[in-house]
Image (cartoon, rainbow, N blue to C red):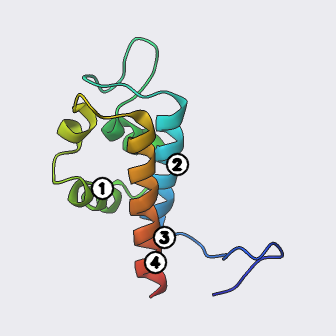
Amino acid sequence: MPLDSTGYVTTTLCPAAALLMRAADIVERGWCQGHLVDDHGNVCALQALYHARGKVTQAFVALSNAVGGNIPEWNNAPSQTAANVAATMRAVAMRLAMERVA
């Protein structure tokens, strides 16, 4: 894998992985449960995928598989946190990126 001047791996993310990374950024800016969008403009995991714009289908399927099939149920679990939602999206994105490289 090519490295940049800092020693980090440089690779172009596949569109679905890039979308998940953007969605994670959106979640970190404002996340909610029980609604697609709350009164403050915060969004749930599913809405973040749509706001991120891109290859939603592949990203949706990958995230859905990672969380047991039901993104809204996973997002709305009482113990769920924005940090975990964003971290899971990033982990799924990296898995997609690694599958592309392999």
In the figure, is residue 97 to the left or right of 46? right
Task: Name the element at disc 2.
Answer: helix
Q: Quadrant of residue 92?
A: bottom left
Name the residue that disc number 3 marks.
14
Q: Position of residue 24 (x, y in %)?
A: 48, 45
Q: As displayed, is residue 44 above or below residue 16?
A: above
Task: Name the element at disc 1.
Answer: helix
The one nearer the camera, 19 or 88, is 88
Name the residue that disc number 2 marks.
22
Camera-nearest label, 1 or 3: 1
Q: Amino acid at mark 4?
A: Met
Name the residue that disc number 1 marks.
63
Q: What is the crowding at mark 2: few (fewer than 14 residues within 10 Å), some, or many (at least 20)?
A: many
Q: CA distance from mark 1 to mark 4?
A: 15 Å
Residue at 37%, 17% (x, y): give it.
38
Name the residue that disc number 4 marks.
98
